[in-house]
Image (cartoon, helix red, strand yellow):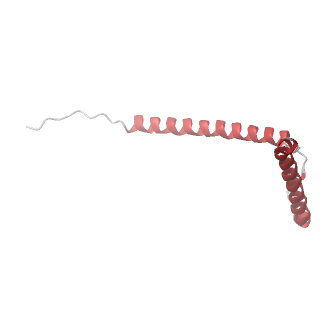
């Protein structure tokens, strides 16, 4: 005579655990993305980029090339300033 083992239907519990795990991952990723966004915005403010800067404005199609040129020029200015900051103390020695 075979022995019957009582099995519990645990698919509901597995589904709940899976949903909780997904919820935790989503909440952690939202938290991390917010932290990265705020850190990046602080870095932009620290480097002198304002919210109203050309880089942060939406692109308008008739004016797209002008905006690309403006962004390129602004990035070149930022790079020059950064190089001056890096090379400044070394040149004074």
x 56%, y 39%: residue: 25
Q: Quadrant location of residue 91?
A: top right
Q: Quadrant of the C terminus?
A: top right
| Near-viewer residue (69 or 17) | 69
In the image, 45: left or right of 28? right
Q: What is the residue that sits farthest to the front in this orientation?
A: 93
Q: Is residue 75 above or below residue 20?
A: below
| Near-viewer residue (48 or 41) | 48
x 85%, y 43%: residue: 47
Q: Is residue 45 above or below residue 59?
A: above
Q: Quadrant of the N terminus?
A: top left
In the image, 48: left or right of 14? right
Q: Position of residue 17 (x, y in %)?
A: 45, 35
| Near-viewer residue (8 or 93) | 93
Numbered label tally: 0
Q: Position of residue 70 (x, y in %)?
A: 91, 59
Q: Position of residue 61 (x, y in %)?
A: 87, 65
| Near-viewer residue (42 or 23) | 42
Q: Is residue 53 above or below residue 69?
A: above
């Amino acid at each position: 005579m075979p022995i019957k083992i009582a099995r519990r239907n645990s698919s509901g519990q597995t589904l709940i655990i899976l949903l909780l795990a997904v919820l935790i991952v989503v909440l952690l990723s939202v938290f991390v993305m917010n932290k990265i966004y705020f850190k990046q915005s602080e870095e932009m403010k620290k480097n002198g980029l304002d919210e109203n800067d050309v880089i942060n404005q939406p692109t308008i199609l008739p004016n797209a090339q002008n905006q690309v040129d403006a962004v390129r020029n602004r990035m070149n200015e930022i790079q020059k300033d950064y190089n001056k900051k890096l090379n400044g103390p070394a040149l004074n020695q």
